[in-house]
Image (spheres, grey):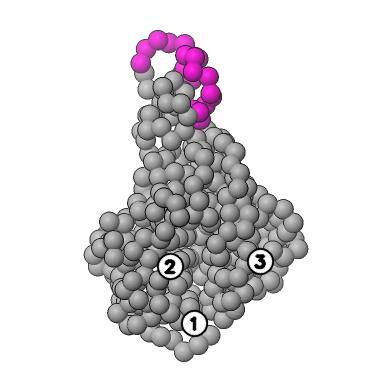
Amino acid sequence: MNRIPVPAVAAVTAAAALMLTAALTIPGGAASAAMSCKPGHGHCPSPSPSPTGTSPSPSPTGTSPSPSPSPTGTSPSPSPSPTGTSPSPSPSPTGTSPSPSPTGTSPPCIVTATFSSNPGDQCTFPADQYPQIQGASVTRLGNDMWNPVPGASLMLTAHSPGDWTDSVNMPAGNSAVVAYPSLDADFHVPVDPWPSRPLSDFTVITSSFSETMNATPDTIASAAYDLLFDNSGTVNEVMIHHDLSNRGGDCSVPWAAQNVTFGGSNGVPVRSDWNLCVDGTSAFWQVPRADSFSTGSVDVMAMLQYLISHGYMAATAQIGDFGYGWEVCSTGGVNEDFRVSSFSITAR
């Protein structure tokens, strides 16, 4: 994976990414061990076991006739309701809405990574568990420590792709990206051999987010999208950096474009401060550091169409992975909570 504005593209994309080889069902998400998969940000496009009951039934008490395990137990017997012994059909205290609760109705999925262990474990959320992400068959969350250094550690706690935190500790002063704690919305067609999808299948791709790095003066990190493509011509990776702390905002080669305007349709506000850096096979859209924003929306399709119309990408481009998270270099040697409190993708 390429990191702005560092030109070491090959070193990143050659980093060992991670393949899903075993899955353990955990309420709130599936934690799975992953090893060695396609280069990128460490998310594998292979199917995995359902995490927490992919049945559309909204019952939180496990009384659904669905054969998949309930988040609150696997017994099919009519165990006591969590609201008490009253036979009245009053609503469950956690609600029956199919949308994920911000606080979670069961223990979250937790995965950790250190310099020497578990760098590829992931939490898995099938599409029917989080409909706020369109276009993907499954979304995976992981620590993605693709460049481990001594002293680095991460602990990801995920209730859903729109409600998760990664507690990160990176050595003070480290200036190279160590990890990309992130979600990956998998746009591959979920049929063997999992081909990527033609970008021409879509007319609209936008995304909204709310995140915080809880940055300190010693934090070196940036919040960014990371999209991977096949059959795309010169550029096969596109990053969109919008919240920068002591990194980014410049380009190691001459700017390809500056002060480009996007937004104004599909609910995306107009911004005229997007700058484009194209370095080898990677393109980076980014705002100046002073213009960083942690809550907002981006018109991803408009940014991709710009690259196509200016010859950086081919119209035959196929999208495989749609990532979002933080490139983290340093937290000053202390724990720092990187948090996503909402996230969505509109793709149609």
At 42% from the left edge and 40% from the top edge, which residue is drawn? 129
Find the magenta span and give its range: 69-89
Q: Residue furthest bottom?
A: 254
The kind of residue on which mark 3 rests is Asn
At 46% from the left edge and 71% from the top edge, which residue is drawn? 237
Residue 111 locus on image (x, y percent): 62, 47
Q: Is 43 covered by the magenta stretch?
A: no
- Residue identified by numbered label 2: 229
> Residue 85: which numbered mark, if any?
none
- Residue identified by numbered label 1: 279
Residue 294 seen in this snapshot = no
Structural distance between the alpha carbons of marks 2 and 3:
22 Å
Q: Residue furthest left?
A: 265
Above or below — where is 139 with respect to 57?
below
Above or below — where is 329 with respect to 97?
below
At 36% from the left edge and 70% from the top edge, which residue is drawn? 317
- Residue identified by numbered label 3: 147
The kind of residue on which mark 2 rests is Phe
Identify the main secondary structure in magenta: loop
Residue 193 locus on image (x, y percent): 45, 55
Label 3's element? loop
Image quadrant in which you'd find residue 97: top left
Count of marks, rendered view:
3
Q: Determine whether label 2 and label 3 are within 8 Å by CB.
A: no
